[in-house]
Image (cartoon, rainbow, N blue to C red):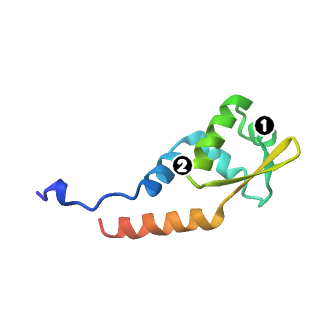
Amino acid sequence: MKNLSTRRPIDPALLEFVKAIASESRLGILLTFLDGQERTVNEISEAARLGQPTTSEHLAVMKRAGILIAERRGKEVFYQPDRLRIAEALDTLSQLLKCC
């Protein structure tokens, strides 16, 4: 058996990304953007069938993980996926998994 202490450390940003999409609710939120449109928290809350406070918590986690970009316009905050960061994280994850 290989000594686990010699394994390569996991990039904290990748770990945060994986944890963020591991939630069924957060994955559901991410899938609301399949049409390419940006959305407000209320629109996301309605589409995901979650309460607004719960949705806001999930959005904060996803934003910290680099999954979403938020832009304030007046009183509204519009969210959209950070497609480049998502693609980079998935590529990194794919490369790691190929080594398993």
Seen from the viewer's position, the closer of residues 88 and 98 is 88
Q: Quadrant of the C terminus?
A: bottom left
Above or below, 93 relative to 39: below
Above or below, 76 relative to 68: above
**Residue at left offset 79%, top offset 54%:** 38
Q: In x, y percent, where is residue 37?
A: 80, 57
Above or below, 32 relative to 9: above
Residues at circles 2 and 1 in contact by the CB criterion of under 8 Å = no
Q: What's the residue type where badge 2 is placed?
A: Ile
Q: In x, y percent, where is residue 71?
A: 77, 52
> Mark 2 or 1 closer to N-term?
2
Seen from the viewer's position, the closer of residues 99 and 79 is 79
Real-space Cα separation, disc 2 to disc 1, in angstroms: 19 Å
93 sits to left or right of 33: left
Badge 1 element: helix
Where residue 21 is drawn, which disc sits there? 2
Q: In x, y percent, where is residue 88?
A: 53, 68
Dot 1 crowding, Cα within 10 Å, few <14, some 14–19, many 20+: few
Dot 2 crowding, Cα within 10 Å, few <14, some 14–19, many 20+: some
Where residue 74 is drawn, which disc sits there? none
Task: Count every numbered label the image shows and give the total.
Answer: 2
**Mark 1 — residue?**
46
Q: What's the residue type where badge 1 is placed?
A: Glu
**Residue at left offset 66%, top offset 31%:** 54
86 sits to left or right of 96: right
Q: Quadrant of residue 8?
A: bottom left
**Residue at left offset 64%, top offset 45%:** 28
Badge 2 element: helix
Residue with the most extreme right position? 74
**Residue at left offset 69%, top offset 36%:** 56
Q: Quadrant of the N terminus?
A: bottom left
